[in-house]
Amino acid sequence: MAEAALLLVTIKIGIAVGAETLHYARSVAKLSENMTLIRNDLQLIRAFIKETERRALTDGVTETWTGQVRRLAYDMEDIVDQFMYVVGKHHQKGSWWSYVKKIVKKPQYLFTLGEIATGLKKINRALTHLKQNRDWTQPIASKNIDGVTEFGKLSKFEIIALWGMGGIGKSTLVSNVFRTEASNFEFHAWVSVSQSYKLDDIWRRMLKEIYSKDKKEFDAEKMTCRELQDELKELLKIRQYLIILDDVWTAEDLRKIKEVLVDAKMGSRIILTTRSEEVASIAHDGCRIKVEPLEEEDAWRLFCRKAFPSTENHVCPLALQECGKSIVERCDGLPLALVAIGSLLSLKAQNVADWKLCDAQLISDLHKNENPSRVEKILNLSYKYLPDYLKSCFLYCTMFPEDHMIHRKRLIRLWVAQGFVEQIGNCSLEDVVEGYLTQLVQRSMLHVVERNSFNRIR
């Protein structure tokens, strides 16, 4: 379906930009040029989708991505139809344009050329985002994800552990597996354990996720810890389930949780992430995966992807390579650190002086005799470089539980209500706060879970 939508829109773009009349107006010719570039990208994506279908490589993540591509193709088709009508509406009957208009849908409202140009910019941003997503979030995933999904094919109950230092990408790897495999289980839930957890909160979160899938109303707030445990046991003993326990700190924590997650002999899975080898040892034999730091080449590639998001193939300028590789070396192959520092540098001028200043600050922070880990110090550097107005907005987000998902509209309303947003010229407060959100995302301080077809955060 996506492949067919892409084929149709690329044909339409070819017809639209092939008209001789486009050469008569500079503004129209520029739109034509932009559509040609978009068509080239869509043709490559179409070829990729055809190849994945031919080789039967589709999975849950790929299907979601393909659905986003299809919606983007429909949006682009609407813009092409607008373009054809606006450019051709003054041509006489019997002209080339009168035949072209027979193959397009008549728009309900006609846009100006300026509005069409704005639509093309949105399409281009969404297209860039889709191409980046196709790269699979982290280079480490391709090396480790097969091991996790392979364990998932076993028929007996299994506890699978991924362990390694903080910031190494354990949660990212497991989230890829969760998105792909969750639909294969009757019940599934993702729970962040963290250091300051409460058992009854864990049971509540599991039950809420399980019941939300069935769209059943469930009031867990008034239930005692024992009632929650009994309810959860009753559900899990008759169903196949997948439970993710993210960031388990001690073996005792895991033992307490495991007591309730019963083995119903139905091939259920518990996947946990931890920094502790002792915690990982509780997993079943053969189901322990140590996540290693990135190799030098992969680390450099990830850094460049974040530091130069708009550059073709994310190539680092020659003048910045020496300083850039020095910064990458200090990240010790930790993906979270590389993403944070790369995102920070993407917002700075691409000159050696600014990069050396950032490197010097990084050296100073890393050599301080304090408790935080290397990745925490690098994240702290990203926070230091935030403008004051963004610091307030970012700190406000710490009020929400770990891994809590919040909708864009709700978050920006809360920021406005707290007085964090300053009026800028004639811009509305909503426009200003949208800019705040974009900046925090660009700096990788907030993680975007979902975007619409125009690349806007949901």
Image: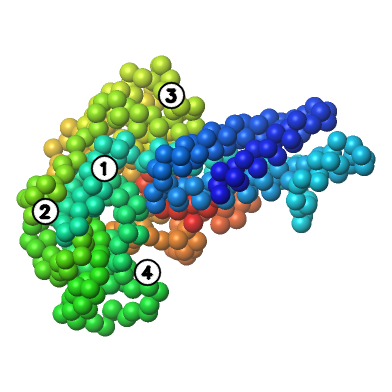
Which badge, 1 or 3, comes first in the chain's sequence? 1
Which badge, 4 or 3, comes first in the chain's sequence? 4
Q: What residue type is labelled 2?
A: Ala
Residue 120 in the image, given as x and y percentages of width and height: 64, 41
Separation of marks 3 and 2 at Cα, in angstroms? 41 Å
Q: Between 358 and 165, which is closer to the camera in this rendering?
A: 165
Q: What element carries label 1?
A: helix
Which badge, 3 or 2, comes first in the chain's sequence? 2
Residue 370 in the image, given as x and y percentages of width and height: 15, 41
Residue 283: mark in rendering: 2
Q: Dot 2: few (<14), some (14–19), or many (≥20) neighbours within 10 Å? A: many
Mark nearer the viewer, 4 or 1: 1
Separation of marks 1 and 3 at Cα, in angstroms? 29 Å
Q: What residue type is labelled 4?
A: Lys
Say if 186 sits above or below 122 in the image.
below
Q: What element carries label 4?
A: helix
**Residue topped by disc 1:** 146
Q: Dot 3: few (<14), some (14–19), or many (≥20) neighbours within 10 Å? A: some
Which badge, 2 or 4, comes first in the chain's sequence? 4
Which badge, 4 or 1, comes first in the chain's sequence? 1
Q: Is mark 2 on a helix, strand or loop?
A: loop
**Residue topped by disc 4:** 213
- Residue at x 26%, y 36% (from the top left corner): 143
